[in-house]
Image (tube, rainbow, N blue to C red):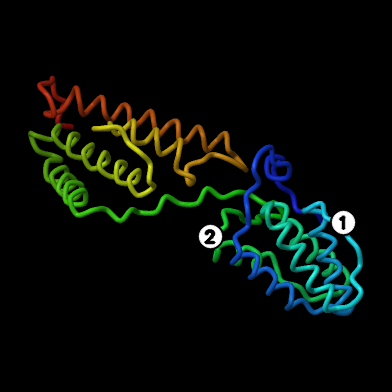
Amino acid sequence: MSLQMASELRFSMGATNLLSDSALKDFLTLIKRVSSPLGCQQTVEIFKRYFCNVSGDYYARSSSLNWAESDMSFQAQNASKDAPNFIAAIYEAFEELRGKGATVPTVQHINQVLANNQCLYEIIDEQLIETAGQVAIPEISESVSTTVMRALGDAKALVGTVDASSAIDRAHTALHGYLVQLCHDGSIELPNNPTASKAFKLLREQHPALRASGHRADDITRVLNSFATSIDAFSTLRNRASLAHVNELLDVA
């Protein structure tokens, strides 16, 4: 059974994504645990054939088990230069062997290897998807952390008071500081005194975890566009309806 995937993963138009050496090692370990009635060498030959299909190497049967295992490791290394199709090769080889009566790892085992090695792929319902990863909570520097936490504390204290409009300024300061810190942690270069909107725009453009790709990419882009619109509106409220400047203030409610 073939593993389904988006065309941009199956047929890369540019540089392919490499599988990490640690993930390759873990997959080779999984292969060694396959129990097959076909015999060791025939089992290895099946994996060789799938890896050659990915790398474009010429497939030829090896003269012995030792040579077969050596050739398979070499061909797996070549195939790992194209991570999505390597994963598909592993999946499809397991499925073929399962159909021949072998005891093979499950999809959960494949996903576990991918997760353990921080590979941004996952198999769901017989389809390989590219995961966006997560924007980790940053290790905030003490100065930024102090500013953000103080701003959030001030905002909470102001809600429901006659100075409630000032909570907008404080909450905006907290969001602004958080976005700037994410850029710093991601080694994303910022201009001097970046706005919250500018920081979010650069995160969207340059942070790999916010790259909309794979399954439902259009919907993900719509969500991110909505976030950008919300941040813009939040900044407008802060600048024109709070005590950040001389403004006509928002109603307390």
> SS of the residue at dot 2?
loop
Which residue appears at 71% of the width and 62% of the height? 77
Which residue appears at 59% of the width and 67% of the height? 22
Q: Quadrant of the N terminus?
A: bottom right
Q: CA distance from mark 1 to mark 2?
A: 31 Å
Where residue 78 sits, quadrant-wise, is bottom right
Mark 2, Cα crowd under 10 Å, few <14 / some 14-19 / many 20+, is: few
Mark 2 — residue? 118
Where residue 139 sits, quadrant-wise, is bottom left
Which residue appears at 73% of the width and 41% of the height? 11
Mark 1, Cα crowd under 10 Å, few <14 / some 14-19 / many 20+, is: few
* Amino acid type, label 2: Gln
Horizontally, residue 89 falls left or right of residue 155, namely right
Mark 1 — residue? 58
Which residue appears at 63% of the width and 53% of the height? 18
Q: Nearer the viewer, residue 118 or 64?
A: 64
Horizontally, residue 163 falls left or right of residue 199, namely left
Where residue 157 sits, quadrant-wise, is top left
Residue 147 position within the rendered picture, expressed as x and y whole percent measured from the top left: 17, 46
The mark closer to the camera, 1 or 2, is 1
> SS of the residue at dot 1?
loop
* Of pointers 1 and 2, the one earlier in the residue sequence: 1
Horizontally, residue 222 falls left or right of residue 69, namely left
* Amino acid type, label 1: Tyr
